[in-house]
Image (cartoon, grey):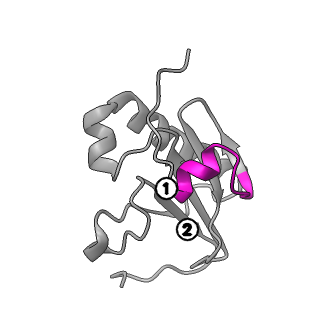
Amino acid sequence: MMTAMTTDPDCVFCSIVAGEVPAEVVHSSDHSLAFRDLDPQAPTHVLVIPRRHVADIGALTAAAPDEAVALLAAVQVVAELDGMGNAYRLVFNTGAAAGQSVPHAHAHVLAGRDLGWPPG
């Protein structure tokens, strides 16, 4: 059973969850949605977001820890569906200074090329 979710009418990710903005969805569950990034930074670049509107992963963990775990489980499903196996990078940007451009929690799943270290 799905719990009550919060949304933000001005949030592009909430609009994608609602089906109001098109996206190339690769996985969907009760608590998360995964879709291809419009500005990919690697050959495979998928965003995994909670259906609940929260600013970042810390806020999701505080508000609904079970949904944070579900989001991480969705990352693994996406990696398997896209044939990434165990060779991918998972990134959570938290706050504008860290590069978060959409204030809705989201994970970047990157794969398909050598991902050097340190990042940016």
State left or right for residue 10 relative to residue 25: left
- Residue annotated with mark 2: 110
Q: Which of marks 2 and 1 is nearer the N terminus?
A: 1
Q: Position of residue 57 (x, y in %)?
A: 33, 49
Residue at figure coordinates x 49%, y 55% from the top left: 11
Q: Callout 1, which amino acid? A: Asp
Q: Report, in whole angstroms, how far the alpha carbon at label 2 lies from the one at label 1.
A: 27 Å
Callout count: 2
Relative to the observer, which residue lies in front, 114 or 104?
104
Q: Callout 2, which amino acid? A: Leu
Residue extent of the magenta highlight: 12-25
Residue at figure coordinates x 36%, y 85% from the top left: 120
Residue at figure coordinates x 30%, y 39% from the top left: 61
Q: In which quarter of the image is residue 114?
A: bottom right
Residue count near mark 2 (Cα–Cα under 10 Å), binned few <14, some 14–19, many ≥20: many
Q: Which residue lies furthest to the front in this view?
A: 9
- Residue annotated with mark 1: 10
